[in-house]
Amino acid sequence: MTHSAHDEPSGPAGFDSLAIHAGQAFDPTTGAVIPPVYLSSTFVQRSIGDLRGGYEYSRSANPTRTALEQQLAGIERGAHGLSFPSGLAAEDALLRTVLRPGDEVLTGNDLYGGTYRLLARVLEPWGIAVRVVDTTDLDAVRAELSASPAKVLWIETPSNPLLRVSDIAALSSLAHEFGALAVVDNTFATPALQQPLALGADAVVHSATKYLGGHSDVIGGAIVLNDDELAERLRFVQNSTGSVSGPLDAWLTSRGIKTLGVRVQRHSENALAVARFLEASGRVAAVHYPGLASHPDHELARRQLAAGFGGIVSVSLGSSDAARRFTESAGLFQLAESLGGVESLANYPHAMTHASLQGTELAVPDDLVRLSVGIESVDDLLRDLGRALDAADGAVSARAEDAR
Ligand SMILES: *Cc1c(COP(=O)(O)O)cnc(C)c1O
């Protein structure tokens, strides 16, 4: 039985308190408020096998990583947290722990490109079958699960890049009805907005690179779950394959998590303003943001994402030329992959983050731009996007002139 700070009846219980304090006790030898970065690969034993605090070798466990893992469990309100060197490493460890050749994974049809690449290009050759369904359509998911049993139902919500919202509680109980494990990629919402384990999911995965780290300065991943036995097997696979985050990376991620609540609140406010601005401009084909009444999953999003709709806004510009011009001419929104940092970024998924999906049924439309709305002053963000819209219109008229 793992004992973490949030189990203490007298300990802090609120999300922001857990983000700041879970696993983050001051250093008992010096009183340093911030737990030190343990840059040590190995640990001196009192006598053979008599370890100080359970540490022997940093691949198996490292105190800085332990501090992060307790913090991760705290914010997702799970029993066990595991920290990985990247989001994909976390996904890989989880999938290889629960799947055997011949097993099937059922996944949503709007999905981070790297997750699909891991499933289709790395795991399929080892005998895993991957099937795709629209997880916003519960009847379709039921039909798929009854047609052929899946071992894992992979749920990304809100999804990347179209921000579709899937019903975690309903999908988890469907998965359990058919004996599948419900896994939620909680990278976009973060536990500041949604806590999938409380809604019935079996495991949560994260790219900690994004909002958890929050400052675009570290690559990391995480798994949080309640099941003791599965957690044990995951730790065995993690140690056996060496898929661990280093202490400096773990420390940076811990530091980021402490401000997750306030950052996500501001990301959500700015993103809603950006989404409304773009929609009201009448100059784009569609704005994809779960906080807009026009979004197909708005009602579910209001129920499931209690405190905000997150910081990602996608925009359909109507043509690939316009999308490229828009992305390349935004200034404050810097042209880069990734998301979730304090600074705003613009990404062209078709040729960047989701390029590996081209030619598959998950291919991203070529007129789509994904904005990671940062926490800068919102007026500056809107002015920047106004200029980008001018440039996108320029692309249209330039083409019209070519045609003449
Ligand atoms: C970035 C991302 C991942 C992969 O995480 P890495 O840290 O880049 O390995 C997985 N899922 C989603 C939704 C992501 O955005």
Image (cartoon, rainbow, N blue to C red):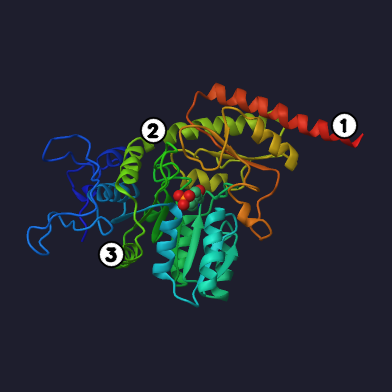
Query: Farthest residue toward the left?
Result: 47
The type of residue carrying mark 3 is: Asp
Q: Are marks 3 and 1 in contact (CB under 8 Å)?
A: no
**Which SS class for mark 1?**
helix
- Is residue 395 rendered to the left or right of residue 194? right
The type of residue carrying mark 1 is: Glu
Question: Image quadrant for the C terminus?
Answer: top right
Residue at position x 58%, y 68% from top?
Answer: 131
Q: Nearer the viewer, mark 3 or mark 1?
A: 1
Choose between 316 and 144: the one closer to the eye.
316
Q: Earlier in the sequence, mark 2 or mark 3?
A: 3
Q: Position of residue 170 (x, y in %)?
A: 48, 59
Residue 61 visible in the displayed image: yes
- Is residue 331 rendered to the left or right of residue 92? right
> Label 2, on which residue?
262
- Is residue 115 rendered to the left or right of residue 366? left
Q: Are marks 2 and 3 in contact (CB under 8 Å)?
A: no
Residue 200 visible in the displayed image: no
The type of residue carrying mark 2 is: Val
* Label 1 packing within 10 angstroms: few (<14), some (14-19), many (20+): few
Q: Position of residue 55 (x, y in %)?
A: 18, 56
Choose between 282 and 45: the one closer to the eye.
45
> Label 3, on which residue?
228
